Image (tube, rainbow, N blue to C red):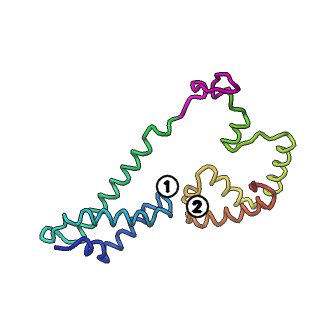
Amino acid sequence: MASSHDIVSHPFTITLIQIKARQLCRRSDFSRSDYEDLIQDMRLYLVEKAHLFDPARGNLEAFVTNALNTWVAMHLRHLGRQKRRPVSRAISLEGTCLEHDGNATTLGAVLSDTDHGRRTQRGDLSPIERHDLRDAVDHAMITVAPDERALLIQVVKLGVAGAARARGVSRRQIKKILARLRARFEDAGLGAN
């Protein structure tokens, strides 16, 4: 009978765990910083389930593959449940009462347009600021070639992955071009906060 240490430290197990963790990190609901945590969680799951391995009924590779596939499915199902929880429900600005300056009022009456602009990161621009912004955009667009301009429009409409698919190139290539264009726009006074 194989011990939990033998199962977790087997080269096949180590490789498969790393592959599964990398696959999960490519998903939008994970990040690269989750990589080590995912590896640790999968190892822990295998340690917990090691007593179920019976070499007479199958080989180690099949057991580990099945166990890790089960763990991934359970983990994704758990994340989906977390997203559906009503913890982050929207609240009504008009239905939420609070005290302001000694009077009972609604939350909507207290919040200003400035608060909304700050929350959505879209401040109201004065006519002068709007004119300056338009000039800065025009100046930056002079340096953008027609094919780069088409790429920018594609990225806005389809996202980086969609633009990469449409052009038949990798996302890395698109991001490299966007970084170069971003530097030009920042030089023109755009994007710097």
Residue situated in front as seen by the camera: 174 or 44: 44
Category of crowding for the residue at label 2, using alpha-carbon neighbours closer than 10 angstroms: few (below 14), some (14–19), many (at least 20): few
Residue annotated with mark 2 = 167
* Image spot of residue 59 (x, y percent): 19, 71
* Magenta residues, start to end: 90-109
Q: Quadrant location of residue 72?
A: bottom left
* Image spot of residue 51 (x, y percent): 19, 65
Question: Farthest residue in the front direction?
Answer: 102
N-terminal label among 1 and 2: 1
Q: What quarter of the picture does the N terminus occupy? A: bottom left
144 relative position to 34: left or right: right
* Image spot of residue 185 (x, y percent): 76, 58
Judged from the image, the secondary structure of the residue bearing numbered disc 2 is: helix
Residue 92 in magenta?
A: yes
| Residue at horizontal 67 percent and vertical 62 percent from the top | 178
Question: Farthest residue in the right direction?
Answer: 128
Say what amino acid the circle numbered 1 marks: Ser
Say what amino acid the circle numbered 2 marks: Arg
Residue situated in front as seen by the camera: 147 or 175: 175
98 relative position to 149: left or right: left
| Residue at horizontal 64 percent and vertical 51 percent from the top | 156
* Image spot of residue 142 (x, y percent): 81, 58
